[in-house]
Amino acid sequence: MKYAFYPGCVSKGACPELYQSVMAVYPKLGITLEELTEAACTGAGCLQEKDQLLGDTLNARTLAMAEHKGLPIMTICSTCQGVFAQANKRLNDDPDYLAEINKMLAPEGLKYKGTTVVKHFLWVLLEDLEEKAWKDKIVKPLKTLRAAPFYGCYLQRPSEALGFDEHPERQTSLEQVIAATGAEVVDFAGKDRCCGLPILTINEPNSMAMVHKHTTDAKTLGADVMVTPCPLCHLNLDGLQHTAASRHNTTIDMPILHFPQLLGLAMGLDSKSLGLKRNIMSPKAALEKVGVAL
Amino acid sequence: MEKTIRIKRFDPESKNPQAYHQEFKVEVEESSSVLDALITIRESIDESLAVRCSCRGAICGSCGLRVNGQGTLACKTKINSLRGSNGTITVEPMGNMAVVKDLVTDMRPFWEKIRQVTPWLQTTGDAPTAEYLAPPDAMTHLNPVMGCIMCGVCVSDCTALEVDPTFVGPAALAKAYRFVADPRDAATNQRLRDLDEPTGMWDCTRCMVCVEVCPKGVAPMDRIMALRSKGMNSGLTDTYGARHSMGFIEVVRDKGILDEVMLTIKTLGLFNISRFMGLLPVAIRSLLHGKLPKPGPFHKPLPGMHNIRRIVDTTEKMK
Ligand code: FES
């Protein structure tokens, strides 16, 4: 399988370890990635607050680039995935709207017909690959590790745009992949809630209360790590966890792994190639549990 | 068929007023709703079970509760439609509200917040002899939001309210939009100014829970986004929220992708010393872990930027 690869801004910016871990993991899966180097930011739902037409046009441009190559898009970010899914739905639901947007793409020689399929890396594993093709690569099952999933809103809602009716397995995709790595899934109610990042600059106390609540709940339930398919959630849960803990006069020390880091560990990759030293909350103790040095 | 319904019970007048879960086995039909099952339990097993309902047809809005952890109307939720419905069905009262008894929650704070957004038409000039009229075309876009039945399900599951009960919340904001976007209303600017205050429209996290759980297609978060857009377009641009959204567009126009450092500066303002001091430890930690994003001039724009800029400028002109 070949994909037009959309890495998203954060894996190229504040979470380089995500990009690094994807680069380490994907060649083992027999897939090929062709990176979309000229594709704009999806807008992350934030640009859309001011101007949805602009967001949909930029995303139609990216969708058209992949369509032109005849490739589906693979994303590695819940937010990118969700924003693409919502834009794709609006473009496909309204031919007049699509035509209006295509006029803006024409000077670049692009036209979007509406056929591009966009899938998060998690969904690629579960839907596009033969089960054997990736599960056989799990040579170092992470037995004894307890991992709590944290999806990111955009990979859970709105379920209609995300195709949950046709693909009910998507709703539990992260638990399925965690279980496949041999780790124990720590189910907790916060897994589909908001990480707080969208309001970090707007209402920091509320944002930090969310980080505090989710990481503390996961810890109380005995999780060694939390795992997320969303680098934006990672930014808040990992990068701001010290801040959240000090605002609430406590220590939490909950490591937050990008899901390709967890998968890579189970595939026997070392912590260096997965960029685990770049995680702010040290996963050292959790890695020791599965016999990996940081 | 027989189903097991696990209900969260709470009786403030009992000797030991603690919430607990109780399981009931109940015979239901193929077409039964969760409310049908609850009424069967109340009528034939335990008459002390408190549940609120009236119309049984998703019109009155009184039967909001949580089924398997998600807010919904009991009368509109078919037992058959529940994923994994072979197993036990867990029924609990709505979240973000005090419980009066069992599945009945206290809706007073809900109504107070609805009243907070002045949920009636505010007009100027002499009153007309009959109704305030508007052409149908100017009102049809409000049909979905006017379909709100005030059940409170969006408030129950709102992730912002979970950490901050002062947030005005999705139902009241959807109601505010209904009047802001009503062509007959004369208080639009004042309404938007009020919503621009703390605990107003900018405290929504954009988590989409309200869109997902609303039983009537009101899509409160979409209305909140429309309120923000209307606010910014009317000149309300001096909140962190507005500066973040507008700064985002500027950064994309400039670089094509996100420049986290520039966006933070644009949002907080360059001389916002106290906020930057608060973020300093975060920046230092990122630096020490080799991942402080490159700022400003070191953050290279995407190749083919002129195409992105052209799109930004074209959509801007279309306004
Ligand atoms: S009983 Fe009226 S809405 Fe459910």
Image (cartoon, grey):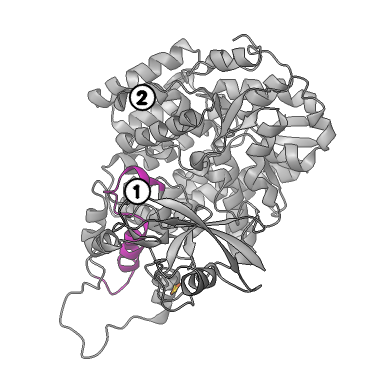
Residue with the mark numbered 2: A245
Quadrant housing residue B269:
top left
Q: Is residue A43 visible from the viewing direction of this image? A: no
Quadrant housing residue A205:
top left
- Residue visible at 63% across and 74% down in the picture: B31
List x then y, in percent, for residue A233.
49, 33
Quadrant housing residue B218:
bottom left
Secondary element at tag 2:
helix
Looking at this rendering, what residue extends furthest in the left direction? B126
Quadrant hosting ligand 1: bottom left
Looking at this rendering, what residue extends furthest in the front direction? B15
List x then y, in percent, for residue B6.
52, 56
User: Relative to residue A119, is residue A148 depicted above or below?
Assistant: above
List x then y, in percent, for residue A123.
70, 41
Looking at the rendered image, the quarter that the N terminus of chain B falls into is bottom right
Q: Which mark is residue B161?
A: 1
List x then y, in percent, for residue B106.
30, 61
Looking at this rendering, what residue extends furthest in the bottom direction? B129
What segment is highlighted magenta in the picture?
B159-185
> Horizontally, is A102 left or right of A71 in the view?
left
User: Relative to residue A72, is residue B185 depicted above or below?
Assistant: below
For the residue pair A243 and A147, the one nearer the viewer reads as: A147
Q: Amino acid at mark 2?
A: Ala
Q: Are marks 1 and 2 on the same chain?
A: no
Q: CA distance from mark 1 to mark 2?
A: 20 Å
Q: Is mark 2 within 8 Å of ligand 1?
A: no
> Horizontally, is A89 left or right of A192 in the view?
right
Question: Do labels 1 and 2 touch, CB within 8 Å?
Answer: no
